Amino acid sequence: MKRQCLSFLFVGVVLGALLTTAAFVGILRARSAHEGASLVLKLAHVQDQSHPVHAAMVFMAQRVAELSGGTVEIQIFPNGQLGSESECIEQVQRGALAITKTSAAAMEGFVPGMAVFSLPYLFRDNEHYWQVLNGPIGRKMLAAGDAVGMHGLCYYDAGSRSFYTIAKPLLTPGDLHGMKIRVMQSRTAMDMITTMGGSPTPIPFGELYTALQQRMVDGAENNPPSFLSSRHYEVAKYFSLDEHARVPDVVIFSRRIWAGLSPQVQAWISQAAVESVDFQRTLWQEKTRESLDALVKAGVQVTYPDVTAFATASAPLLESLAGTPIGEMAERIRTTR
């Protein structure tokens, strides 16, 4: 009996040692996976790895690693792995996620002032667009997120949004009548489609390919790189470059996590974010040209409708906002020189 007890005891000791060794090896592997980083921050977005936004995120992560000497690591989760844009924003608010890149349109439900960026034909040109984003208005919008748990880092270029459709091209605003058009979860975007005569249908970006394929919607709207990288052109063969809206992307950081970082780490992250903006803007321009060429080669019919007609059709939306905070902000943007 004593021998049997000793045998059990010996087996237990051996098993305990093995389990302890396995756990220790697991810890070592986890540490080596982060290459010695003492701080690991998670970043999520909905674009795939071929998108210029993802490349900018990788650039930012590399710069943070360089500036911090490898002590701070940003792990990137693309393709909506951690949720839709709205879900990622909510995770940032809670502190479950450190960073996300989202469209300003998706921010409307959290920072109402961001709705102004979804208004049609708001910016005169590219220079005006960046003048506003880098000026007092843009900085005010980024700072507004602090009150709801989001520290704004920077803006990324998301180009101009245009319509793509399954059955026919949109040559005039009248072609939108009776059509179901997918839009982001943005009240302003929905109102714009309604004003033009279409039927707005909010659908998460990750579900849009299937929605187009099953004809749940007749079309959608986005920029050329996103239209290409999402492969929506496989279903929607008409791309009408009316360029009705220029909605920036926003990179936001969890306020809860930010407050717990040292000033030095905050400075590294801020510097890397700013540097990534120039990188992303240059890459975006190149990718937009390449995307349009690739879409044509893939059999997409790219058309250039009369932009004035679409601007005129959407004008009632702008007029309805006169005297409201959004309307007043829109007027400030229009008069920015």
Image (cartoon, rainbow, N blue to C red):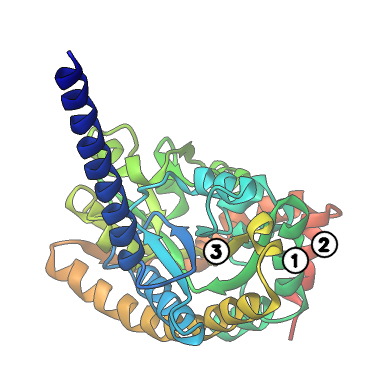
Quadrant holding the N terminus: top left
Which residue does the numbered mark 1 point to in the structure image? Answer: 143
What residue is drawn where x is 17% and y is 52%? 234
Residue farthest along the front direction in this orientation:
2
What residue is drawn where x is 66% and y is 83%? 131
Residue 270 image offset from top left, x and y in percent:
61, 78
Give the residue type at disc 3.
Answer: Val
Say whether disc 1 or disc 2 marks the residue closer to the N-terminus. 1
Q: In this rendering, does residue 159 appear at all?
A: no
Say whether disc 2 or disc 3 marks the residue closer to the N-terminus. 3
Left or right for 210, reference 174: left
Cα–Cα gap, marks 2 and 3 = 18 Å
For the residue labelled by badge 2, is the local secondary structure a helix, a strand or a loop?
A: helix
What residue is drawn where x is 68% and y is 58%? 255
| Front residue (pair 130, 36) | 36
Crowding near pointer 1: few (<14 within 10 Å), some, many (20+)? some
Give the residue type at disc 2.
Answer: Glu
Up-down relation of residue 12 to residue 251 (above or below): above
Q: Quadrant of residue 206?
A: top left
Give the residue type at disc 1.
Answer: Ala
| Front residue (pair 309, 326) | 326
Tag count: 3
Q: Nearer the viewer, mark 2 or mark 3?
A: 3
Left or right for 325, reference 281: right
Up-down relation of residue 297 to residue 233 (above or below): below
Which residue does the numbered mark 3 point to in the structure image? Answer: 247
Residue 243 image offset from top left, x and y in percent:
46, 66
For the residue labelled by badge 3, is the local secondary structure a helix, a strand or a loop?
A: loop
**Could you say which disc has been placed on residue 328 in the image?**
2
